Image (spheres, helix red, strand yellow):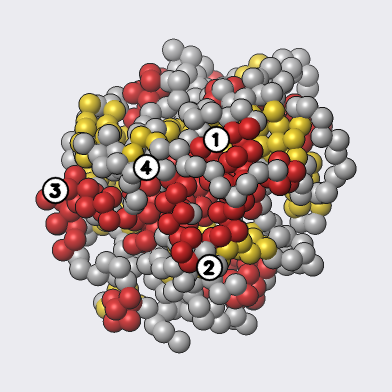
Amino acid sequence: MVNYIVKKGNKYWPSKEMKRIAWVTDSKIYKKAEKNPVKFWEELAKEGIDWRKAWSKTYEEKLPYFKWFKGGKLNFCLNVLDRHIGNGHKTALIWVPEATDERTIKLSYKELFDKVNQFANALKKLGVKKHDTVAIYLPLVPELVISMLACARIGAAHTVVFSAFAPDALQARIIDGESKILITADGYFRRGKKIDMLSNANKAIKGTKVNKIIIVKRLNKKMNYRKPYYSFDKEIEKYPHYCMPETMNSEDILFVLYTSGTTGKPKGIVHDTGGYAVQSYYTAKWNFNLNPDDVMWCTADIGWITGHTYAVYGPLLNGATTLLYEGTPDFPNFDRWFKIIEENNVSIFYTAPTALRMLKKYADGFTDKRKFSKLRILGTVGEPIDEETWNWYFKKIGKSRCPIIDTWWQTETGGTLINALPGIGPFVPTISGRSFPGTRHEIVDDNGKKAKKGNLVQLPPFAPGMLHGVLNNHKKYVETYWKRFKKKYDTSDGAIMINNLFRITGRTDDVMKVAGHRIATAEIENAIDKHKQIIESAVVPVPDEVRGEVPVAFVVLKSDKPSEKLEAEIKKHVDNTVGPIARPSKVYFVQDLPKTRSGKIMRRILKNILKHERPEGLMTLINPDCVEEIKMVVG
Ligand code: WTA
């Protein structure tokens, strides 16, 4: 079996075999790109993407905004589908349903092309125009990919909402995006059970501008399609296999994806067409040494940025095969993912540390029976990976012969930004690596001075895939990313520099990573505060062996007495307003929450109490007495 790495000293490096096949092998590329990053990206953009019209200005910076490939024109969907149609029999997408007795679906580039074109025609007929926003609330089914690409074809922006979000969360996103059309499903399967989705969608559209709902049949429910409901299958059937792709400006919106910030209101992160195309194409190609004959499995749900860029756009722009799996890793047992990897010849496997910690705990026994002979590259994303989990991944799945690419990035950055490249290395546990060629990051202290440990910032010229603002909220955009360090993009992540490589330590704001999902403490607090018995609440993360972090809530009640019933009710209430991923693992009932004179809740003190540490900053509290009471409650 081919070995793609060698050990030198205490680090892993690419082997000769990897050097032979990798797209990028010479570390001089970093210096070359740094000399003139704009020219560097310009050359890549010309080579990697089909443009309908060349740009007049490669990069224009008027902070806090910046534009790439100004004046350039292209169609994203054409880059994904039309240019691979010469090799149209090739598999574009493998879809593995959760039920083991249901058939895997494979769509070739030609089949995907046909369906996307048909659906693009259907959307047009249903009134979707260039620059409209289309909301998509679908489980992991091929129709999700078809919908996204159809939007891109006709120049409509898509906004995909994670399928496990509750009606309130979906509604807020539909309203902010001003979508008039919603694509959803009759439901989906989870561990063999049927999960209803349509009733969530129906609740969510109340009070929005949505006047058409297209339904994908996954549970085969009997439906009467009367206005405003349309059947996805029936609509598709009506139309021809070709729809002229719209010519879009490089800076036109490709999609909006909502993510959590420090307030309760999610931010609509805006991504453009040209810059995002270039970054998603090259990061997928170089980080994962992606070739058309590769099968890439990015396990992230498409409702999150990782799924957008590395389950859909990145692999398809490269003409590779992307694998989507509908279900959970433990169905029918913990061998499921491994079986999928082997049966489908997965060569690139990209997942989150939380999934790896779960597999390490429950699926270890299954790994020895598997060879994973087709695997070449492993990736990780979403949160810091600890050394033990890294080693487990390396040995048990990578069989000590595949590099692990630890990619740091965010919803806002569109594509990966800090990681080792497979042909260059090194691959070191807990270290992400260097800035992607053509991008620059540094670490600064709280005063903005360069430091070895502190806040991670990005320096200009900013990467082509970076966000183009927050939808309908210029103020939020400026405050979140540009206020603290002026002309440097503030990532809100902590980092340490070790031998010129970045180790990312995690969020420095009130954002949690629960099983890899990004959630703001304020979002959960807002949901809890809506409960009629609650005066106020504070949510903080606590470490969790598998999920990384889980939320814990402290609540102050109006008149009711604390009870297990009330705790269960509050948890259910969070399920129904945000979604089960935000459910607090524990609810503590307290008399008062620690506050500063200005009324700010000191969540840090609550974190200290939970970890049995000495609370810091008691001096600044207006109500220090509550600390002893909270300690008693926590026990
Ligand atoms: C965290 C996910 C450590 C980080 C693509 C960031 C990571 C947040 C890594 C963004 C990594 C992502 N190592 N931490 N390799 N990758 N993060 O928007 O805190 O869901 O700010 O995007 O995930 O989460 P988001």
Q: Residue at x 26, y 42 (%)?
A: 54
| Label 2 – label 3 distance at C-alpha | 37 Å
Q: Residue at x 11, y 50 (%)?
A: 35
Q: Residue at x 75, y 27 (%)?
A: 228
Element on which disc 2 rests? loop
Position of residue 117 relative to residue 448, above or below, is: below
Three-letter amino acid code of the residue under disc 2: Lys
Q: Residues within 10 Å of mark 2 (few under 14, many from 20)?
A: many
| Label 4 – label 2 distance at C-alpha | 24 Å
Marks 1,3: beta carbons within 8 A: no
Precedes in sequence: disc 1 or disc 2: 2
| Label 1 – label 2 distance at C-alpha | 28 Å
> Residue 501 got which mark?
none
Position of residue 513 relative to residue 261, above or below, is: below
Write down the quadrant of residue 95 in the picture: bottom right
Marks 4,2: beta carbons within 8 A: no
Q: Residues within 10 Å of mark 4 (few under 14, many from 20)?
A: many
> Residue 74 got which mark?
4
Precedes in sequence: disc 2 or disc 3: 3
Task: Give the number of the mark in front: 4 or 3.
Answer: 4
Three-letter amino acid code of the residue under disc 4: Leu
In the image, taking residue 18 as reference, residue 327 lies left or right, namely right
